[in-house]
């Protein structure tokens, strides 16, 4: 790290301050003046806007951030971390109550304003080291493009070896592990993303697993309509606002979720696409963490586009239209990729798989071909589609969901899942088998007596 001169002394770590409380700036500067190592404050920022502008100009390796700074939210902390700046929260002496809020905002290091010089220097150096070691979320071992890949990837699910429903549930309750997050994604058009997300979530609830379903589609959110719910409630956007302010917990999350069936809660999406900036990636990461803590299964319906805006990529303060989708895909344990079983849908699926591999190369994928029918794919549609996917995308053994318009129309008209509207339909049987494979419950019988609690 190149040094800089200040007051005739060379310093290796440039520190910014952004605190509102009177006298805190001067106290922190004096503390660092006698601290060991070559550390010094180079700028005192009066607000969050000045802080982000300073960091954007390449000044500062660490920031001492007051917990009372106006407009401080998770997006601010996330922007600082993306700029590889170490963030240290500063609180009043003895007031440890603010530590939890700062932690929810993403601040990993919190110190009292009267901290000793040695301890402050050590904390700053540790935060700087951690910020410098942070890797891009899109880095990883990934999967080689153009290689054969089994389309159905069985992840480490809850209660994989369970032999009975009660044993499986006991495992979930006693393991203490975080719940699984399943993202449902598909290319442009209407391949069946929402239909698949809704029914996977319902099948999880049928197995007795506490399940949450969220609509993160910033182009055309529709889970509320599919389930016959009013979408005026804030839903996912409301939870994201609380997360951005560091105020989201299990209770507030429950207030924004709709209870639609035993073991199933729903966070509806934004009613108008113009409201997409409300679903910021940093806030969604916190929402997903909270959902994982209260639900064994979280299913998220994503938007179709994974393109990054080249003009905004290096502007840490500018939101990305597709940030919600990318954040969801990166957070997911498994991504269910769905394409339509017709020539147009399959062509989009092949290209979409390539785009997805570039955007989130580390993702674990399960490929689903929806609305499979012989009238458009030939007398042996699964064989024809399977050969095409293996040849052009290196995909083997995709999951096939047969076209079942009568069952799907009945479900949509009633605002129901397939398990409620047409439990014996071919589409439902296929999605049920897929859901059990994803969750490790394929040998278990579903619970009986499903009924809708709230509409």
Image: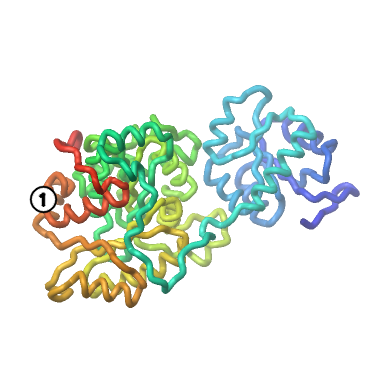
Q: Which residue is located at x 46 percent, y 49 percent?
A: 280
Tell me if mark 1 has few (under 14), some (14-19) or many (20+) residues whose alpha carbon lies within 10 angstroms of its own. few
Foreground residue among 224 and 116: 116
For the N terminus, which image quadrant? Answer: bottom right
Q: Is residue 62 left or right of residue 296?
A: right
Quadrant in which residue 72 is drawn: top right
Q: Which residue is located at x 79 percent, y 57 percent?
A: 2
What kind of element bears circle 1? loop
Residue 151 appears in the rendering:
yes
The residue tagged 1 is: 424
Where is residue 331 shown, x and y percent of the image?
Answer: 44, 51
Q: Is residue 97 left or right of residue 209?
A: right
Q: Is residue 435 left or right of residue 312?
A: left
Where is residue 349 shown, x and y percent of the image?
Answer: 31, 69
Foreground residue among 158 and 426: 158
Foreground residue among 44 and 83: 83
Q: Is residue 307 above or below residue 39?
A: below
Where is residue 136 shown, x and y percent of the image?
Answer: 56, 57
């Amino acid at each position: 790290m190149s040094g800089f001169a200040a007051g005739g002394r060379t310093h290796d770590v440039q520190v910014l301050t952004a605190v509102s409380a009177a006298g805190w700036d001067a106290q922190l500067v004096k503390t660092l003046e006698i601290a060991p190592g070559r550390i010094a404050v180079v700028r005192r920022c009066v607000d969050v806007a000045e802080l982000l502008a300073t960091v954007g100009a390449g000044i500062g390796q660490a920031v001492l951030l007051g917990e009372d700074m106006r407009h401080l939210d998770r997006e601010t902390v996330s922007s600082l971390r993306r700029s590889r700046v170490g963030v240290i929260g500063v609180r009043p002496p003895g007031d440890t109550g603010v530590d939890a809020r700062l932690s929810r905002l993403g601040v990993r290091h919190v110190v009292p304003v009267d901290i000793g010089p040695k301890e402050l220097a050590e904390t700053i150096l540790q935060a700087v080291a951690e910020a410098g070691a942070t890797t891009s979320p899109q880095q990883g071992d990934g999967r080689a493009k153009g290689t054969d890949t089994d389309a159905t990837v069985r992840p480490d699910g809850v209660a994989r070896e369970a032999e009975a429903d009660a044993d499986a549930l006991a495992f979930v309750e006693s393991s203490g592990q975080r719940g699984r997050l399943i993202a449902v994604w598909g290319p442009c058009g209407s391949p069946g993303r929402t239909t698949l997300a809704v029914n996977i979530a319902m099948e999880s609830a049928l197995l007795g697993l506490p399940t949450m379903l969220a609509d993160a589609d910033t182009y055309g959110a529709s889970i509320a309509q599919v389930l016959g719910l009013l979408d005026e409630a804030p839903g996912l956007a409301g939870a994201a606002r609380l997360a951005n302010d560091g105020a989201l917990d299990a209770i507030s999350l429950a207030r924004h979720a709709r209870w639609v069936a035993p073991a199933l809660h729903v966070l509806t999406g934004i009613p108008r696409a113009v409201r997409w900036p409300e679903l910021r990636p940093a806030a969604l990461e916190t929402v997903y963490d909270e959902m994982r803590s209260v639900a064994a299964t979280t299913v998220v319906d994503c938007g179709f586009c994974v393109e990054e805006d080249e003009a905004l990529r290096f502007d840490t303060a500018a939101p990305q239209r597709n940030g919600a989708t990318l954040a969801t895909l990166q957070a997911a344990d498994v991504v269910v990729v769905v394409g339509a079983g017709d020539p147009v849908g399959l062509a989009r699926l092949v290209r979409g798989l390539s785009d997805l591999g570039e955007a989130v190369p580390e993702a674990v994928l399960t490929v689903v071909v929806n609305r499979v029918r012989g009238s458009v794919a030939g007398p042996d549609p699964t064989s024809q589609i399977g050969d095409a996917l293996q040849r052009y995308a290196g995909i083997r053994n995709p999951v096939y969901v047969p076209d079942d318009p009568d069952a799907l129309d009945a479900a949509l008209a009633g605002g129901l899942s397939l398990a409620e509207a047409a439990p014996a339909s071919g589409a439902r049987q296929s999605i049920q088998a897929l859901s059990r494979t994803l969750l490790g419950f394929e040998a278990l019988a579903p619970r009986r007596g499903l009924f809708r609690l709230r509409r």
